[in-house]
Amino acid sequence: MKRRHLLAASLGLAMPSVARSQAVRTLKFIPQSDVTVVDPIWTTAYNTRNHAFMVFDTLFGMDSAYQFQPQMLEGFTAEPLLWRLTLRTGLRFHDASPVLARDCVASIRRWAVRDALGGALMAATDELTAPDDRVIQFRLNKPFPLLPMALGKTSTPMCAMMPERLALTDPFKQVSEIIGSGPFRFKADERVSGARGVYTRFADYRPRETGALGWTAGPKITHFDRVEWVVIPDDGTAAAALQSGEVDWWELPPSDLMPALKRNGKIRVEIKDPTGVIGFLRMNCLIPPFDNPAIRRALIGAVDQQDYVTAIAGTDPANWRTGVGVFCPGTAMASDAGMDALTQKRDLAGVAAAIKAAGYTGTPVGLMVATDTNYRKAMGDVGAAMMRSVGMTVDYQAVDWGTVLRRRENRGPLDKGGWSAVFTTLSGLDMSNPSGHSYRGTGEKAWFGWPTAPKLETLRDSWMTAPDDASRNRLGADIQRQMLIDAPHIPIGQWFQPVAYRAGLDGMVSGFPIFWNVRKT
């Protein structure tokens, strides 16, 4: 039976009016690091995702209840094997061209090549077409109830809509221009690599007129004419800039500076993302020593999650969690399945013996450590010591995060610029189910690290088409057990990262940094 969803009938929050003053209203923001990749599908880096949501819009948005609502869409109809999505009228790209269904079709196709959930959607699609200028149509070969999640997800890479002429770019080549239909334009002419990114208000952006505001759903109202991302690698300098009022918002203040920031009566320090951050050791499964799954599996026994989270977030247990598996604690997929590997008493001598028995003969571990971000450096320092404690030879490679993003795509050996291991993170939200790229086991087609895990792939495919939540939860437990056997990565705990901002800012949405609806009072 056909189900029709039209926002005008179901949602009733009126769009507020926006007063415009003569003066240019500017917001200055310190990101966690420079945006070295500006193409929204080219990396899983969160600073690129945050940049992309300013510039590009999505067909669906995620609300505060983690449900997916039409965003660029007026509504949609859904049958088991046919979905028809209808665009809102009057949408325009930054180059003044209208947003048409064929632009969206090309954008979906390009994104799906690089995204795990997008790939699953296209595998379930027999035909993706634009029957007219406003309708996007999916004819499926099997039901795919996660379609709104796929097209509206906030995890990287997000499904950004761009003009067809750009969306036809090879997914493995970056687009020549950053043109979206989102609330801000990207000012490439004002970008200074390593120092500054600039965004200006898109005057022709059409926010939703109705809808409950939350995360990426609802009306996106811009109260600033200009947003500047000011890159300040030194934490002390960043803290001083925030305290003096030179900048308005700091994404990633370190734990050791929190007390001073909290004492400043003009600064607020708050946790905006309730799902926190989950860190993990990602290993290169193509080259020794971690091409051997027995070595990867044995190394799990050396991980003491408390060592990592206290190095990152301090000693107050309110700021972190241990006993963290491959899914975010507190979500439906989280379970204790297979967790003995991470929670039983640590035996470093036993781990060293197991690693040796698995065939390790002293092969250097090229560990990339991003030293320009406090939590990444903390993970790397603890991890290097952990590996050495079980007899591994560690080549500690201190680099900046931009270098990590470039080098982690290198599949070659160490002497050809390759790598063995790197510590990275995903938000808890991105690890709440197995739809994301970090759960793939498709070898060289998988996320960086490129694990081959056919059993994991079979379980994940079953999860995608499971008929109900109970079935998905059972499969989630099986997926966690298999992840801890294949060990494409090792979870090292969860922590909650506060942001710091000037007390005059109001309207900040929970979640990752979002620049609509924020205003200065």
Image (cartoon, grey):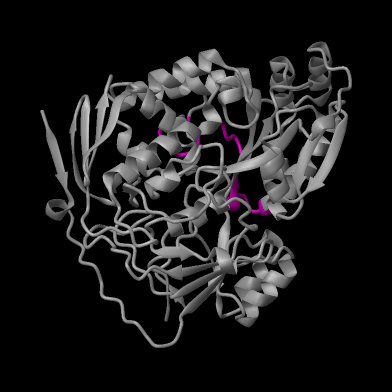
Q: Is residue 193 visible?
A: yes
Q: Is residue 22 left or right of residue 130?
A: right
Residue 110 lies left or right of residue 37; in this view the side is left
Q: Quadrant of residue 314?
A: bottom right
In this rendered view, identify the residue nearer to me: 497 or 315.
497
Q: Is residue 23 left or right of residue 496?
A: left
Q: Position of residue 245 (x, y in %)?
A: 60, 81
Q: Is residue 86 above or below residue 457?
A: below
Please tell me whether residue 125 is drawn above or below residue 322 in the rendered image: above
- Residue at the spot x=87%, y=26% of the render? 391
Q: Residue at x 59, y 75 (%)?
A: 247
For this view, does 449 lie left or right of residue 439?
right
**Which residue occupies the extreme bottom position in the image?**
22
Quarter in which the N terminus is drawn: top left
User: x and y percent of residue 185 in the render?
Assistant: 45, 64
Name the residue at 62% across, 75% down: 242
Q: Is residue 32 magenta?
A: no
Q: Nearer the viewer, residue 106 or 198?
A: 106
Q: Write the residue at 84% across / 22% down.
A: 349
Residue 144 appears in view: no
Looking at the picture, does residue 366 appear above or below residue 360?
Answer: below
Q: Quadrant of the C terminus?
A: bottom left
Q: Position of residue 333 (x, y in %)?
A: 44, 30
Is residue 181 placed above or below 281 in the rendered structure? Answer: below
What count of labels does the image hold?
0
Asked whether residue 319 is drawn in magenta, I would say yes
Which span of residues is magenta-colored? 313-334
Instruction: Using the image as rendered, state which of residue 350 and residue 423 is in the foreground.
Output: 423
In percent of width and height, residue 248 lies at 55, 74
Main SS class of the magenta portion in the image: loop
